[in-house]
Amino acid sequence: MQTIQNRITEGLDAGATIVCVFDEDVRQWNDSERKRMDEIHQKYDTNKNVIIASSMPSIEYWLLLHFENTNRYFGSSAKVIETLKKHLVGFDKKRAFSQTREMAFGHHQRQQDATGLSKSKAFWT
């Protein structure tokens, strides 16, 4: 969490607006994560230059929407991950976001290269 707070401070010092996306479903079952997220919210919720974006129930669902147009009820993030792995083979929730981004972006590029068309929505482009 200190790294996140350092990055927020760096951005604010540079005059930027900061958007932080957190997978806050973890706070429902992990007390230490709940405390960390409470700290982040207490510190930045009133700062107009910091936007805390919470993915609820799971960020995996948001990732899945880049590959499937669905409004299916999954019931748990584990079910979403099971479906997401059909598109992102080797996806691991514990993997750093940057690695997941590269995996997904590579998948997106392969789809474009194979067909000349994008089969998924723009992914971090």
Image (cartoon, rainbow, N blue to C red):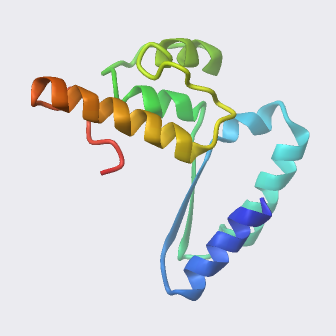
* Residue situated in front as seen by the camera: 105 or 68: 105
In this rendering, would 111 be left or right of 95? Answer: left
Q: Position of residue 91 (x, y in %)?
A: 56, 25
* Residue situated in front as seen by the camera: 100 or 58: 100
Q: Position of residue 124 (x, y in %)?
A: 36, 48
Which residue is depicted at the point 17% across and 31% down?
113
Which residue is depicted at the point 65% across and 36% down?
95
Q: Position of residue 37 (x, y in %)?
A: 76, 53
From the image, which quarter does the N terminus lie in? bottom right
Query: Which residue reaches farthest right?
Result: 31
Residue 40, quarter of the rendered image: bottom right
Query: Which residue reaches farthest left?
Result: 116
* Residue situated in front as seen by the camera: 111 or 36: 111
Which residue is depicted at the point 17% across and 24% down?
114
Residue 39, quarter of the rendered image: bottom right
Residue 119 sits above or below residue 73 on the image: below
In this rendering, would 1 be left or right of 66? Answer: right
In this rendering, would 119 be left or right of 104? Answer: left
Residue 78, quarter of the rendered image: top right
Q: Position of residue 59 (x, y in %)?
A: 55, 35
Which residue is depicted at the point 33% across and 42% down?
123
Residue 17 showing in the rendered view: yes
Residue 76 showing in the rendered view: no
Q: How many numbered marks does the figure carry?
A: 0
* Residue situated in front as seen by the camera: 117 or 28: 117
Residue 1 sits above or below residue 44 on the image: above
